[in-house]
Image (spheres, grey):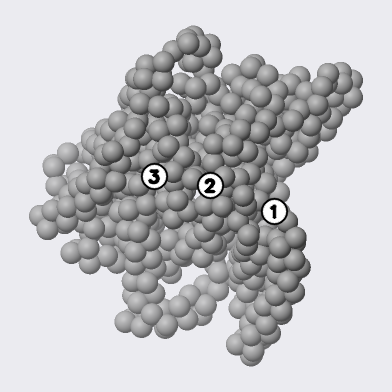
Amino acid sequence: MVFTIVTFILFTALVAIISWYLTKDDNLNTESGYFLGGRSLSATVIAGSMMLTNLSTEQMVGLNAQGFKSGFSVIAWESGASIGIVILALYFLPKYLQGSITTVPEFLEERYDKTVRNIVSIFFLLTLGVAFLPTVLYSGSIAMMRLFNIPELLNISPESAIILSVWMIGIIGSIYAIFGGLKAVAVSDTVNGVGLIIGGLAIPVLGFIYLGEGSMIKGIEYLFQHNPGKLNAIGSKDSQAPFGAAITGMRIMAVYYWCTNQAIIQRALGAKSLKEGQKGVLLTAFLKIIVAPLILVVPGIIAYNIYGNQISGDIVYPVLVNKLLPSKLSGFFGAVLFGAVLSSFNSALNSASTIFSLNIYKPLFSPNISERNLIRVSKYFGTILAIFSMIVAPFISKSSGGLFEFIQKVAGLFSVPIAIIVLVGIFSKKTSALAAKVSMGFFVIVYGYTQFINPVKIHFLYVIAILFVICLFLMYIVDKIIPPKKEYFLPVRYEVSVEPWEYRYTVSVMLMSLLVWIYVVFSKIGLLSQSENLKGRIGIITFIFIVLTYIICIFTRKVEKKN
């Protein structure tokens, strides 16, 4: 245990030292320097930071628990998210950088009015402060407690161990976010990201070796021989990710999360150019398609094959890690998990502070405040929000669907209305502020009633999809009854180069083709078919996809060269 603790401290300290060294000369006394890293982030840093902000213990714990229960179909949350990421790269990011947007509420004020900005700012803060930050701390505390066996180590109760872990994670994460600004957060994310990918991929590899009694190949074969139904990417109606919901409500939530969620897009907004931003975002999409399922879903399926119905719920991943991981690697993996929790926590805290300072405090209470004093206000607010999250986190009770579904269900209350008005705001020049307000109010009231006051028996993702369509129709009706007075044109304020990446469309086509290929292969058409010649079948499917992708890419290259 001493060796484990020492390696944990050494790796955690190494990340802190690297982050300090690479950011020690940065100017954190300006809005751009503190909130957007001086608009100097490279593609690699953007991808690493976006990925690690997304991949935290609430997903490692929560999504692997869903994988344990529903199988490979829950990759819809991960690989399927690449659709929203590609949309960010091709459509949203060029608009954001063209207008030098710092926050989404700032864009909505220009697009609609100040009231919409204020409402959305409050929605963002509620989503981050009530749903996201406490659950990140709670899930992180569960993982750390199980990995290091803190109750036995310190001779305290599990409840006390959770509280101790929550405050340790919260305090260290707050130091990064409050005193280091966005660039310190992004750099630490990138360094931790390398460790997370190595450590995260080690778990399924060790799991396959365990199932195959020393052979990784035999372990993979074991999954197909004993529980092939768990490998079906097409979710049934009883799955926690039904295929119908995966292509409707889940995709709407992905647009919010990857295209309008301040904690995620703030990394892309800090890009040194549109070209670097698009490269980083599309690299993130690739990692979500290939790497994320191996870390966040496959371990849950392996755990099912090892334990069956002996365990369940959000302890699945920590129990599996304890079983598979050699004791000498526990410290390193603990540091990786710790870094993942810190990443999500400090990223969300930094974004919440940014929104409060720039979109609530400055315009409403002190329009003429200096940049230095505004940053001081941001740090005070970040401290208060962090303490609130640390107090709330230990009292979170899991919903019947588990921790991950709890986060998604609560986040949907405020996130989807934001996605709707941002989407319409970007692609429509005539939609009014009144239409946006009616849409947001209608969604929050109806969704809140059907999910928390008088829950309906329909999957919450289907409810989101239905309300999404109704809200779009409502906005159209409102604008017909009370036409907007003028059209909107996004101002052009070039702080960075907005020349797009030459291969953006071609790479996007390749990514979407890869996504569809995975769904076809892991279905009854592919590996789960009853065909006697599976290798030949998969070979034919792969050949067809390669040919179709090549033909489409020829067309996209012509478009790119013409542009």
Amino acid bearing label 3: Ala
Q: Position of residue 292 (x, y in %)?
A: 48, 59
Q: State the SS at label 3.
A: helix
Closer to the eye: label 2 or 1: 2
Q: Position of residue 189 (x, y in %)?
A: 37, 48
Point out the tag, 3 or 1, that comes first from the N-terminus.
3
Q: Which mark is residue 247?
A: 1
Relative placement, left or right, of 295 versus 322 is right
**Contact (Cβ within 8 Å) of mark 3 with mark 2:** no
Q: Which residue is mark 2?
A: 273
Point out the tag, 2 or 1, that comes first from the N-terminus.
1
Relative placement, left or right, of 380 versus 398 is left
Amino acid bearing label 1: Ile
Q: Quadrant of the N terminus?
A: bottom left
Please report the residue visible at 74 percent of the width from the left and 35 percent of the height from the top: 424
Please report the residue visible at 63 percent of the width from the left and 82 percent of the height from the top: 538
Please report the residue visible at 69 percent of the width from the left and 26 percent of the height from the top: 111
Of residue 400 and residue 207, the one placed in the foreground of this image is 207
**Contact (Cβ within 8 Å) of mark 2 with mark 1:** no
Q: State the SS at label 2.
A: loop
Q: Which residue is mark 3?
A: 186
Of residue 129 and residue 32, the one placed in the foreground of this image is 32
C-alpha separation, residue under disc 3 versus residue under disc 1 = 31 Å
Q: Quadrant of the C terminus?
A: bottom right
Amino acid bearing label 2: Ser
Q: Position of residue 440 (x, y in %)?
A: 69, 26
Q: State the SS at label 1.
A: loop
Q: How packed is label 1: few (under 14 Cα within 10 Å), some, or many (20 or more)?
A: some
Please report the residue visible at 72 percent of the width from the left and 42 percent of the height from the top: 465
Closer to the eye: label 3 or 1: 3
